[in-house]
Amino acid sequence: MNARKLIQYLDDQKQAIEALIAQLDEVQVTFNAQFDEFKAQHDATLDRLSDQIAADPSAAGPQFMAAVEERLPEERQRIDERRQKVREEYLPKRQQAADDLLNKAQAEMAELRALNPQLDTQEEDLKAEKAGLEAQLAVLNEDIGRLSRGLGVVSHFLAITKADRERQRVIGKLELINDSLRQVRQGWEQRREDTEQHQSDLQKQWQLESVAVARLQSELDQLDDEARREDLAQRRAIRYVLDNLKEILSASDASLDAGLRQMVQLNVSTDAYHGGLASVGGMIGLLRGIGSGNDALRRSVEGLDNEQQMHSAYLKPLDFQLPSSVEAFHQQWPALGRQFADEKIIGAQPADFSSAVEPLLAGPLSQSNIEAMFESLGTMIQRATAQW
């Protein structure tokens, strides 16, 4: 096939891959939506059983409590590590952040208070200068009025002209002083408003840090209590065993026995959802990788085609012999599209989806098969351009 046909073939495969990705995106959305609902049920059951066993550990039976005892050292160590972190890192860091915010707010207010008398002095100086100019202007106006009476306009023309020039100069200086006064007052008002807003922001941040400090201090107080630490370790161990329970353990209490069986089912289903989400995410990533490889190959073929057309006088048209293995590889997209068409049914059975994907990743979509397909395409291009 020529370059144009090969490019069209690659475009067709791109569309098929993108359509399959769109279907898998829908499956992923369904998995996530259903997992959110399932997780709420799982966590509610976990909370209920944890509280029930913590209130009466003997009701859980010897097998369960043996698993709890086995887990206890790990939980005690985790609690000790948390206690050390809170005391030496988290609490001091939060306390320092709160202190820094308070110091910053106080420094900002001190700066504003220091600025106020400076601006007041500046304003008073401008007012004094303004008063002097206004008095000077009044004298000039009086002189001009006196010299302009009757025929004085003619006899005192030069003096009147000189006084009027001085009058205009004074008026100009007064306008500049008035502008300076406005700028001083507006600058103060803007600075005050900005400071008030920033103070409000700092106060909110300080309150958040203070709440965090209080919570950490409360946690540290509890962790420093040996009896509370042991109770917390026991509760954490119970929760861990419940959350990882995959085999049925009989309990002496009938309702608790039923709860443990339910927990096993929920944990198994949780693993299935995790596996399904990982499988669909892996498939989407793999297909996007193949699509990117096809795009890169398409650009190469298009570049070669453009070069051949530019130099057609001495470069022969390209003739690509598409390997049968490449055609076989890309023929799987329609079948996969049909296999993953109903996202609702697939979304309800995450374990089945994982089981369906596993042989694909080990066979048709294995890394070795993908690499072989692209190597075949690369060899095809080398053979087509060998005649150049």
Image: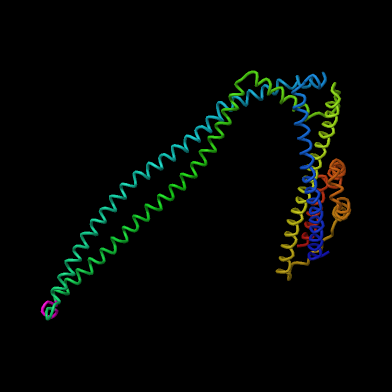
User: Residue at position x 75%, y 25% from top?
Assistant: 238
Q: Position of residue 350 (x, y in %)?
A: 84, 42
Place residue 146 in its image quadrant.
bottom left
> Within the image, what quadrant is residue 79 found in?
top right
Q: Quadrant of the C terminus?
A: bottom right
Residue 323 placement (x, y as % from top left): 85, 56
Compared with residue 385, is residue 48 higher up or lower down, i.e. above or below? above
Between 314 and 103, which is closer to the camera in this rendering?
Answer: 103
Determine whether 157 is above or below 67 in the image. below
Q: Is residue 352 above or below residue 21?
A: above
Give above or below for 134 relative to 259: below
Camera-side residue: 102 or 283?
102
| Quarter that holds the N terminus | bottom right
Identify the residue at horizontal 75%, vertical 53% (top origin): 293
Residue drawn at point x = 81 percent, y = 28 percent: 245
Magenta extent: 153-157
Q: Position of 57 compared to 170: left or right?
A: right
The colour scheme used here is rainbow
Q: Is residue 11 magenta?
A: no
